[in-house]
Image (spheres, rainbow, N blue to C red):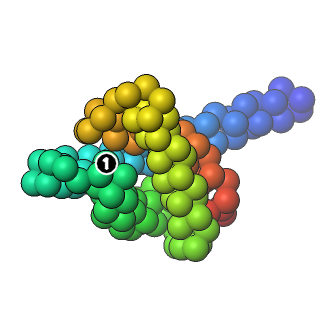
Amino acid sequence: MRDDATSRQTSSTAERARQEAGTATRFGLVGLAATGVHLAVAALMLFLWPPLNEFIANIVAFCAAFQVSLVGHRRLTFKRQGSAWRFALVAASGFALNNGLLAVLIQGLGMSGFVAIAIATLSVPVVTYLASRLWAFKE
């Protein structure tokens, strides 16, 4: 009897791990699409208007990427509506973290332009996944 219960528990744990891996993978794919939009919009803006402040380009790029992210996570990642206002808070917090890191890269380390935006943008996803999974799109 004990072996049967242990077997079911192990199977259940393995199934939960498999499901979580699938959710994390979908989150990553949606995040890659949103990040691609973010970086493409920022690059285009800096290309078209070279003297444009990196923070302005980053704000506009974030707004475009947010739309991709919200729709993608609702339809693909978590497959539920979730809370749009909670996700907006998660995204805004991620954006604040992104901009804080961008400020350190530009002002503290002397970087500029697209490379600074790319580093800042690629550094935030783990935090936003956890907050989205555990709070914004909570079951």
Q: Residue at x 49, y 53 (%)?
A: 95
Q: Amino acid at mark 1?
A: Glu
Q: Residue furthest left?
A: 48
Q: Residue at x 52, y 44 (%)?
A: 100
State the image quarter where residue 89 is shown. bottom right
Residue density around tag 1, few if under 14, some if 14–19, many if 20 or more, within 10 Å: many
Q: Nearer the viewer, residue 138 or 50?
A: 50
Horizontal relation, residue 8 to residue 34: left or right:
right
Work out whether 126 lies above or below 83.
Answer: above
Q: Position of residue 5 (x, y in %)?
A: 83, 35
Q: Position of residue 137 (x, y in %)?
A: 59, 63
Horizontal relation, residue 32 to residue 126: left or right:
left
Q: Residue at x 36, y 52 (%)?
A: 55
State the image quarter where residue 119 is shown. top left
Quadrant (top left, top right, bottom left, bottom right) of the C terminus: bottom right
Horizontal relation, residue 118 to residue 48: left or right:
right
Q: Nearer the viewer, residue 38 or 74?
A: 38
Can the viewer see residue 117 in this picture? yes
Work out whether 38 lies above or below 16.
Answer: below
- Identify the residue under disc 1: 54
Q: Position of residue 101 (x, y in %)?
A: 49, 38
Can the viewer see residue 23 in this picture? no
Work out whether 138 lies above or below 105.
Answer: below
Quadrant (top left, top right, bottom left, bottom right) of the N terminus: top right
Q: Position of residue 135 (x, y in %)?
A: 67, 59
